[in-house]
Amino acid sequence: MDTYNSDFWKALDELVSQSKIIIDRPKGTAHPRFPDFIYQVDYGYLENTSSMDGAGIDVWVGTKADKRVEAVMCIVDLMKRDSEIKILIGCTEEEKEIVYKTHNETEYMKGILIER
């Protein structure tokens, strides 16, 4: 079985290109419910999309000039009892590692990074 599906990545590219990216939690700001957590990469969502939590599809936006879809994080949140994907856009290798660690640093949230 071929596990790389180019149509999946094309669909994500289309979704991202047709959506406005809203950064509501810029790098360096604190999480609204967990003030000790500081975002190390810009975090936001795609406007007019929906995800498991009823809000827009979450995105991490890195510092690369090319804002290409680089990867997705598939996460399971045991506190919220849900799962979601987070799209990584324009992320450097270091930023991908930060995002991966962010989604795996507590016992309540675990994730896997799937690179393009």
Image (cartoon, grey):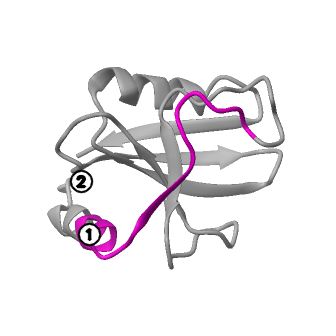
**Magenta part of the chain:** 11-31
Residue labelled with disc 2: 3
Estimate the spatial distance between the alpha carbons at disc 1 and disc 2, rounded to whole Å.
24 Å
- Quarter of the picture holding the N terminus: bottom left
Judged left or right of residue 54, residue 26 is: left
Does 9 sit above or below residue 96?
Answer: below
The structure residue drawn at horizontal position 24% and vertical position 73%, both measured from the top left corner, is: 14
In the rendered image, residue 92, in percent from the top left (x then y), is placed at 28, 28
In the rendered image, residue 94, in percent from the top left (x then y), is placed at 34, 20
Q: Residues within 10 Å of mark 2 (few under 14, many from 20)?
A: few
Judged left or right of residue 14, residue 24 is: right
Judged left or right of residue 58, residue 14 is: left
Residue labelled with disc 1: 17
Q: Nearer the viewer, residue 86 or 40?
A: 40
Does 39 sit above or below residue 50?
Answer: above
Judged left or right of residue 14, residue 39 is: right
The structure residue drawn at horizontal position 37% and vertical position 73%, both measured from the top left corner, is: 19
Q: Residues within 10 Å of mark 1 (few under 14, many from 20)?
A: some
